[in-house]
Amino acid sequence: MSDPSNATIAAAFDELGDLYELDGAVAYRVIAYRNAAKAVRDASVSVSALTREGRVTSLPGIGKTLEEKLRALLETGTIPATEKLRAKFPPGLIDLTRLPGLGPKRARKLFDELGIDSLESLREAAEGQKLRGVKGFGPKFEESVLAAFAAGVAEKAAPRLVLNKAVELSDAIVDALRAHPAAVRVEAAGGVRRLADSVKDLDIVAASEDPPALAAALADLDLVESASSSGENAARARTHNGVSIDLRVVAPDQFGNLLQHFTGNKQHNVKIRERAVRKGLHVSEYGILDDATEETLRCATEEEVYARLGLPWIPPELREDRGELEPGYVVPDLITQEQLKGDLHCHTTASDGRNTALEMARGALERGLEYVAITDHSATHGFGNDVSPDALKRQIELVRGINDQLDGIEVLVGTETNILPDGAPDYDDDLLAELDWVVASVHTSFGMSSAEMTKRIVAAIEHPWIDCIGHLTGRKIERRKPYDLDADAIFAAAAANGTMLEINSAPDRRDLNDVHARAANAVGVTIVINTDAHGVSTQGIARWGIATARRAGLTAADVANTRPWAEFAPLRKHARAAAT
DNA sequence: GCCGTTTTCGGCCCGACTGTTTTCAGTCG
């Protein structure tokens, strides 16, 4: 049995939090488990390893009790308290809380008094008008339950929107509202502003001298299917494709407070308010109340909000309570897309791309890059998109010719070679040696154990001609889980071998993710940000890789392909091997 | 259940809405 991953441990703590909540534990105990789950999820090292080393209580929110539970999980594969509570509450009980207006307390009450233990039994009770018999429940609740079932809310968890789709929609709404005469300022907030992997809904904030007019304007947008206003200064809407939008409007002199509040994330805000309370200050979306003067400071800008709290302005991408509020934290000068000088991973018509190598090279040049690597899929890729060894030899000639012909950009010939299950690339070493640059990626056999997958990737990292590992975990955001691997071991091997790890910029990959990128950087791995573009039209997607790098706190100096070609070139294994 | 410039106990963020209530607990963002 291999050690549980951080994701597995975090899920176990979340489940225990849910179970304690159903059990009626004091709220702070439940919060403690949720906080611990977050700390584990955000940890840049293996929590299993920390536990074995006796250092796990150094993580914020993990004390002696949770350490004990972690030890039990490692030794027996389960936590006794979890087993006990699972026996007490049917698994379907948690599902009930997916319904609007039904939280753990009320779900528990329905279970105790009516024996409701699943979505199905809840539906039957609502249809039979049995719910109104329970104190605190009435006909309106029965109606809302049936409406939720009719809308399909109960059947599946609400889908989350991958960031690029969310940004596209959010931009359209923000632009439309800005055009309204009552608008003074309109900005996207929430996960869109933090450039999270995906978002649940869109949060939009605005400043206006006439809030109701702007709230009403949201309902009139073409892309809005239905809208309801809740209060004069707020509106909630749904788009035709089912995305929820929350709009909040305040006076211009409070806009900074509102923007800060709705940018979040929740943990960041909670920590900010907890710190503020110790200074006699109370932070809300309307202002900062000072106990000493009983006056509320309204802030037109976010900078004022943070300054009043004795903090530097923190870029939204870093507002995740991952250390950015700790004393002495220095806000890094985060990398920007304009600082990228090269792209080391893209495809052409030789494999599954839509444009030729010449077109991709020109596209990169037009985007201001100094170097680009042509890296088509390798011999065993399949789907009819593989490049045989002979075809790769022809590709070498072709790309070398393009490089001679194009001024202003270095065009490298490379490959994205498959990492076979035994860790070997699928071209001969002699052929790989002829290339300028080799990315190696896992495209098959995702289901290996963590130990096997780690061994496989480390073998690739140790290969003399593999310069870089592509999309390390294979995740597809909201569609496919990352494969199991020991990230710490892989980062150590990459640092030791001088093998680079990419942040793949495909908006549904962003792999390395933010947590991994931070951890890899911390142990000295050389990181590059690549587009993996399959056509000229998507060569701009580096913005999503940049977003992940910023969320990881990386600066230009932390990312190798911000360097000019003359400085980047010698960092490649291909250059180092040629020099010896 | 965690934690400390309120330090080993007694605290632990903010505001709004909802449906059900006679004053509010629970839920949500």
Image: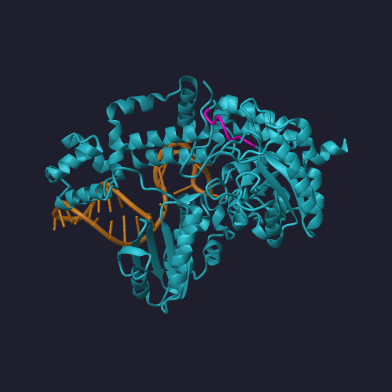
Q: Is residue A24 visible?
A: no
- Residue segment shown in magenta: A441-447
Q: Is residue A96 above or below residue A277?
A: above
**Residue at 40% in and 69% down:** A249
Position in image of residue A531 (x %, y %): 63, 50
**Residue at 12% in and 45% down:** A129
Chain B: its colour in the image is orange
In the foreground, A303 or A525: A525
Quadrant where the C terminus of chain A sits is top right
**Residue at 28% in and 34% down:** A92
Chain A: its colour in the image is cyan
Q: Is residue A219 above or below residue A357?
A: below
Position in image of residue A213 (x %, y %): 35, 75
Q: Which of the 4 image quadrants contains residue A440?
A: top right
Q: Does A202 appear in magenta?
A: no
Position in image of residue A578 (x %, y %): 85, 38
As drawn, is A506 to the left or to the right of A9? right
Position in image of residue A11 (x %, y %): 44, 35
In the foreground, A29 or A481: A481
